[in-house]
Amino acid sequence: MKKTKSFKAALALVTGGLMTAAMAACSPDEPTNEITKKLHEDPFKAILTLQEGELSGSQFNANPRMTDFKSSVQPAQQIVWETIPGKGWQITSTDKGFKVKDFKTHPNVVYSLKFDYYNVNGTSMNYQFFDNGQDKIHQHFFSVYREIIAPDGTVGNRRETKKENLPFDYNYADEYNGNYIADTNPMGFQGFIRFLQPDTEFHLNIELLHAPKSKLEDNGKPSPFYLPSKTNLSTGLWDIVIAVPVRIE
């Protein structure tokens, strides 16, 4: 983690070429027939809502439910992405990143993280990722990418695969038709996140997997929040890929 990297520089990276390249597969400006192959539309607007609070009567790593969460008096932070003709996905909200408290100084602080997606007509479409068996092939992943330099000098990025090296921790808290499904069928449309390293800035990379068959590992168990299975990494599609600048104060 590079603590010396400025928040402004990080933001420029996200709002520049990184987002355009990363989301090209789902951009409406690219010629594609993906919608005809899927049982859901491609999202044209995404809203991420981060709310500070704490968990009542539940441990962070003990399958907390949304009913365990109590919001603080702090207003929620929201980031909005929209597809702009000729430009693809762009941040259109006033907030361009999240500013959060660290776990070491504030051990009781937990954040809820919620996703809301809308189609080209502005209609909510979260249900499309749940209904008709779509819940079995969709999952949000939350990760960090490290810069690597190849022997020939080529610069690239590699996903951090060790949980202990992440500056955050996350737990799914999804429900479907009133039933808690996060432990066996995690999706990441709602969940809890806390931030572990004070005085740190990083990109929280968020990817919504569209698996060709199953989002589960070969052993039938869910993948951890930071690492899709090898099969889905090589064969899966990505309905959304975004990078959120985060400053841990």
Image (spheres, rainbow, N blue to C red):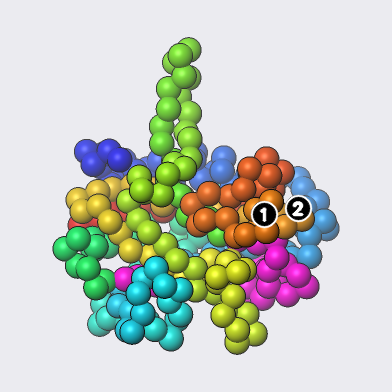
Q: Is residue 17 visible?
A: yes
Percent of width and height locating residue 137: 70, 61
Which amino acid is tagged 1?
A: Asn
Q: Is residue 118 visible?
A: no
Secondary element at tag 1 = loop
- Disc 2 to disc 1, C-alpha distance: 17 Å
Q: Earlier in the sequence, mark 2 or mark 1?
A: 2
Residue pictured at 58% horizontal, 67% vertical: 186
Q: Quadrant of residue 51?
A: bottom left
Secondary element at tag 2 = loop
- Location of the N terminus by quadrant is top left
Residue picked out by circle 2:
212
Percent of width and height locating residue 215: 67, 57
Decide which of 75, 186 is in the foreground and name it: 186
Decide which of 60, 234 is in the foreground and name it: 60
- Where are the magenta residues, as a range? 110-139
Which amino acid is tagged 2?
A: Pro
Decide which of 24, 167 is in the foreground and name it: 167
Residue pictured at 52% horizontal, 56% vertical: 224
Q: Quadrant of residue 67?
A: bottom left
Whether residue 113 appears in magenta in the rendering, the answer is: yes
Q: Which mark is residue 4?
A: none
Residue 48 left/right relative to 234: left
Q: Quadrant of residue 31?
A: top right
Residue 210 left/right relative to 208: right
Question: Do the CB atoms of the residues marked 2 and 1 lie less than 8 Å apart?
Answer: no
Residue pictured at 47% horizontal, 33% vertical: 157
Instruction: Kindly give the residue lying farthest to the left in the view shown.
Output: 105
Percent of width and height locating residue 16: 45, 41
Instruction: Kindly give the residue lying farthest to the top in the view shown.
Output: 152
Position of 184 relative to 137 (above/below): below
